[in-house]
Amino acid sequence: MDLQKWNLFPLLALLASFIFLFYVQDSSKPSQSGCSLLPHGHYWIASKSIVTPQGIVSGAVILFYLFSGCLNGQWRHVHLDDPGRAEWEGFPSGTKAAAAGGITTLIDMPLNNFPSTVSAETLKLKIEAAEKSIYVDVGFWGGLVPENAFNATALEALLDAGALSLKSFMCPSGISDFPMTDSTHIKIQSAIENHLETEDDGGDPRSYSTYLKKRPPSMEEAAIRELLTVTKDTSIGGRAEGAHLHVVHLSDATEEIPDGDIRFKCAPPIRGAGNKEKLWNALMEGHIDMLSSDHSPPVPELKLLNDGNFLKAWGGMSLYRSFVLPVTWSYGQKFGITLEQLVSWWSEKPAKLARQHSKGSITIGNHADIVVWEPEVEFHLNEGHPMFVKNPSISAYIGKSLSGNVLATFVRGNLVYKEGSHALAACGSKILAA
Ligand SMILES: [Zn+2]
């Protein structure tokens, strides 16, 4: 590894990351100023429960790092809206919230910032905005839009500039400079979300059922059918090898969404409990092999909190902070999920998807990104809970009782978060396609 070396106690072969207790020793080498809450360049972490692919073991990990950096752990679908709409969510607030939730790496979506990230030039603006503003590692998706879809030179330039992959919308995105595509535009690997619209057909706009009628499952089914016409090229050896479908919304069901509570408006919409059960079963049976969670908040005014109009409010949810791990863990108890599965869904598989081979597991040569948490600790998420996001008032999951508390987050060996406090300096690394 280039930035730090790992030494593991001899009897342990550690390949994944969750640790419940930790202790720090030694101070042989100071860390780079402000990047870490630890004033040590050499330390060890011990725990009675370390999750590895071979099972849960007790032991210790020794870390030596030469200078700052930050890497490996969990991944998110997230909209950090610098430049252009930092009042929705920005790099400093978004990455601080991520660190507080045990998330060590984010992949930023190409829209909601302005201009949208659809060219080498606009990706450069993103990269510049992230400079000295990120507390965890951040990579960038590029956007596939009609304007660039048939321009191989422009797409190659976007990928050469560092975009990890491309994302497109199959319905209006709600962002004027990120128009929708169809299957004819999707010629290369893309993360796909399915969004289609119909005309308003009446009904109480505060009723969630009205919103569901406006966006029936048949729309997503139609979009998926259209996608299937291009997936024949995505198998091994195909010209679009590696394309994938992105499925979200496992933790809630329409039955839990009160009328007027537009914090839960997203697109495609959260469906009924039956769908939720099927998604969980697909996850448990391995048909879905990784998890992500969209964080797409606007400013509170666009959420129309007081109005509660599902047809007019912005269709993105705020799903940040300590929610990813505890929500998955809490809701997954019913299905008997294990810590090993949690690591696989949130770390190993997403790292492979983004082709970040130095991330996703604790192993010699990998980046020292570690989450320390207490899965058994229960807490009630109320308004006073520190969230660190730009607009906490629109956060979903407020009012829920969850299990699993993040104590500390290490990124590339730096202790970037511990029990409510962040490192002074934003020393996250930008991840660009090689
Ligand atoms: Zn999104």
Image (cartoon, helix red, strand yellow):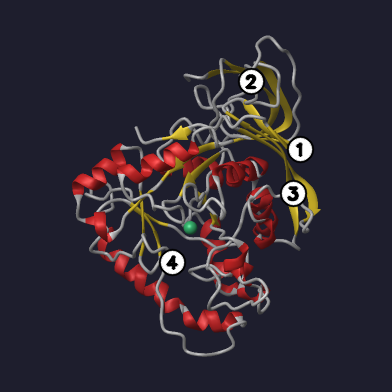
Among the 4 quarters of the image, the one containing residue 15: top right
Q: Are marks 3 and 4 in contact (CB under 8 Å)?
A: no
For the residue pair 91 and 54, the one nearer the viewer reads as 91
Q: Relative to residue 135, is residue 150 drawn left or right?
A: left
Q: Position of residue 369 (x, y in %)?
A: 58, 31
Q: Position of residue 218 (x, y in %)?
A: 41, 78
For the residue carrying disc 3, how many other residues have a C-alpha within 10 Å: few (<14), some (14-19), or many (20+)? some
Q: Which residue is mark 4?
A: 174
Q: Is residue 35 above or below residue 301?
A: above
Within 8 Å of ligand 1, the CB of disc 2? no
Of pointers 3 and 1, the one earlier in the residue sequence: 3
Q: Position of residue 337 (x, y in %)?
A: 64, 52
Of pointers 3 and 4, the one earlier in the residue sequence: 4
Marks 2 and 1 sit apart, C-alpha to C-alpha, by 20 Å
Q: Is residue 218 above or below residue 103?
A: below
Q: Is residue 401 visible?
A: yes
For the residue pair 257 and 156, the one nearer the viewer reads as 156
Q: What amino acid is labelled 2 in the image?
A: Ser
- The secondary element bearing badge 4 is classed as loop
Q: Relative to residue 120, is residue 102 drawn left or right?
A: right
For the point 62% across and 29% down, the residue is 425
Q: What amino acid is labelled 4 in the image?
A: Gly
Q: Which mark is residue 386?
A: 3
Q: Which mark is residue 419?
A: 1
User: Which one is closest to the eye, mark 2 or mark 1?
Assistant: 2
